[in-house]
Each structure stands twice: as structure tokens, then as C-alpha cells.
């Protein structure tokens, strides 16, 4: 089992910055990657950024050059630095951890943190 606790959301003005944190606990040795997802009202949950334990990183096109995902393995914490925020970034942001299992991987989710960008 893996538990994830997010923090760092809030209200920010257009063009501002926020840093989200996600601390993992439990069977963290079994995690092979983390992701940040977001879900806006009336929309599907979408991947924002992902990082593997080997350091491979992927971003959604809409956040490239503005958001940065990083992982502090000593602290079992993954971060999402969000710069140049736009009103369309407003959503609930969820941390995800993926654990490899046979026959299928297992996804764990945090409780979500609200990010609101005012225009």
C-alpha cells in the first residue's frame, strides 16, 4: 500500500506561481513513477506531468516550459513547480504513484488539492 498526501494548492493571480508537494508513505520502494493529474469542473482528468524513478519526464503540451516536475527520493516527495499560471490551469490537482504488479500495475491517488488562478 502507498499513501499520498498533497499540499501547496491555493488561489493565485494570472501569471503567478505555486509549488505543489506530494509526500508518499508506505511501500514507497515499490513505486516506479509519479504523476500529477488535474481535473477541471465538467472535464476529464488529464495528465499534467510524470516522472519515473529513473528520471524520465513527460509533460502535457499545455504546460511545457511553465511547469516543472521533480522528485526528492530521500524525502519520498514529488513536486510540481507551476509558473506563469493561467486561468485555464484552474483545477483540482491529484498526485499519482504507480506500482508495478503482475498482471497489471496499480495506481494510488492523493486526495487532491485545489488550484485556482484568477484573471
Image: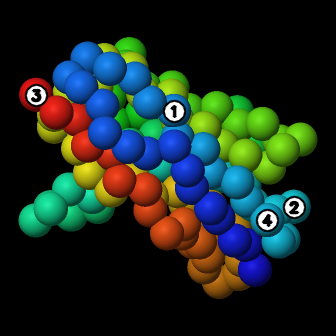
Which quadrant does the N terminus fall into?
Answer: bottom right
Secondary structure of residue under mark 2? helix
Asked if the residue at tag 2 contacts the one at tag 3, i.e. Cβ–Cβ closer than 8 Å, the answer is: no
Taking the image as drawn, is residue 51 in sight? no
- Looking at marks 3 and 1 on the same chain, the residue that comes earlier in the sequence is marked by 1
Is 104 placed above or below 43 here?
below
Asked if the residue at tag 2 contacts the one at tag 1, i.e. Cβ–Cβ closer than 8 Å, the answer is: no
Which residue has dot 4 on it? 25
- Looking at marks 1 and 2 on the same chain, the residue that comes earlier in the sequence is marked by 1
Of marks 2 and 4, the one in the foreground: 4
- Looking at marks 3 and 2 on the same chain, the residue that comes earlier in the sequence is marked by 2
Which residue has dot 2 on it? 29
Give me the residue at 26% from left, 51% from top: 91
> Residue 19 — which label?
1
In this rendering, position of residue 58 left or right of residue 16: right
In this rendering, position of residue 93 left or right of residue 100: left
Q: CA distance from mark 1 to mark 2?
A: 24 Å
Taking the image as drawn, is residue 80 in sight? yes
Q: CA distance from mark 2 to mark 4?
A: 10 Å
- Looking at marks 4 and 1 on the same chain, the residue that comes earlier in the sequence is marked by 1
Q: CA distance from mark 3 to mark 4?
A: 36 Å
Of marks 4 and 1, the one in the foreground: 1
- Looking at marks 3 and 4 on the same chain, the residue that comes earlier in the sequence is marked by 4
Give me the residue at 78% from left, 36% from top: 72
Position in image of residue 34 (x %, y %): 61, 51
Depth check: 11 or 102 in front?
11
Give me the residue at 65% from left, 64% from top: 4
Which residue has dot 3 on it? 119
Asked if the residue at tag 1 contacts the one at tag 3, i.e. Cβ–Cβ closer than 8 Å, the answer is: no
Secondary structure of residue under mark 3? loop
Amino acid at each position: 500500500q502507498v499513501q499520498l498526501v498533497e499540499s501547496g494548492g491555493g488561489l493565485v493571480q494570472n501569471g503567478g506561481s505555486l509549488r505543489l508537494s506530494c509526500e508518499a508513505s508506505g511501500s514507497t520502494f515499490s513505486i516506479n513513477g509519479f504523476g500529477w493529474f488535474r481535473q477541471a469542473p465538467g472535464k476529464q482528468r488529464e495528465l499534467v506531468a510524470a516522472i519515473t524513478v529513473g528520471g524520465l519526464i513527460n509533460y502535457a503540451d499545455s504546460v511545457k516550459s511553465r511547469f516543472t516536475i521533480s522528485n526528492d527520493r530521500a524525502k519520498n516527495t514529488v513536486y510540481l513547480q507551476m509558473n506563469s499560471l493561467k486561468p485555464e490551469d484552474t483545477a483540482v490537482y491529484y498526485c499519482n504513484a504507480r506500482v508495478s504488479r503482475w498482471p497489471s500495475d496499480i495506481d494510488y491517488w492523493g486526495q487532491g488539492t485545489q488550484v485556482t488562478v484568477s484573471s
